[in-house]
Image: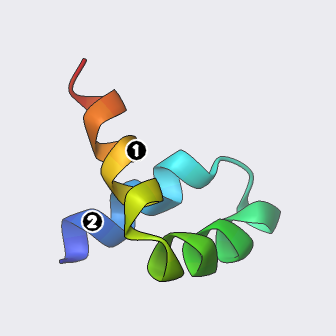
């Protein structure tokens, strides 16, 4: 789970946006899934 949180921070980019995207990702598993797929291309 920790790795997922760290990677979500990575996908978020700028720290200012990280919380917004973290919340969006948490509410939208599809986003996290897409982010995960992109990291393994």
Q: What number of labels is visible?
A: 2
Q: Return the x and y of residue 38 as percentages of the image width and height.
A: 35, 29
Looking at the image, residue 29 sits to the left or right of residue 41; the answer is right
Q: Residues within 10 Å of mark 2 (few under 14, many from 20)?
A: few
Give SS at disc 2. Answer: helix
Q: Are marks 1 and 2 in contact (CB under 8 Å)?
A: no
Residue 15, quarter of picture:
bottom right
Q: Return the x and y of residue 13 as percentages of the image width and height.
A: 65, 47
Quadrant of the rendering where the C terminus is positioned = top left
Q: Residue at x 27, y 65 (%)?
A: 4
Residue lying furthest right: 16
Give SS at disc 1. Answer: helix
Q: Residue at x 40, y 44 (%)?
A: 35
Label 2 sits on residue: 4
Q: State whether residue 41 is above or below residue 40.
A: above
Q: Residue at x 60, y 81 (%)?
A: 23
Q: Which mark is residue 35?
A: 1
Looking at the image, residue 4 sits to the left or right of residue 8; the answer is left
């Amino acid at each position: 789970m920790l790795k997922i949180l760290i990677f979500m921070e990575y996908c978020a980019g700028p720290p200012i946006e990280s919380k917004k995207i973290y919340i969006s990702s948490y509410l939208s598993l599809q986003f996290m899934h897409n982010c995960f797929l992109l990291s393994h291309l």
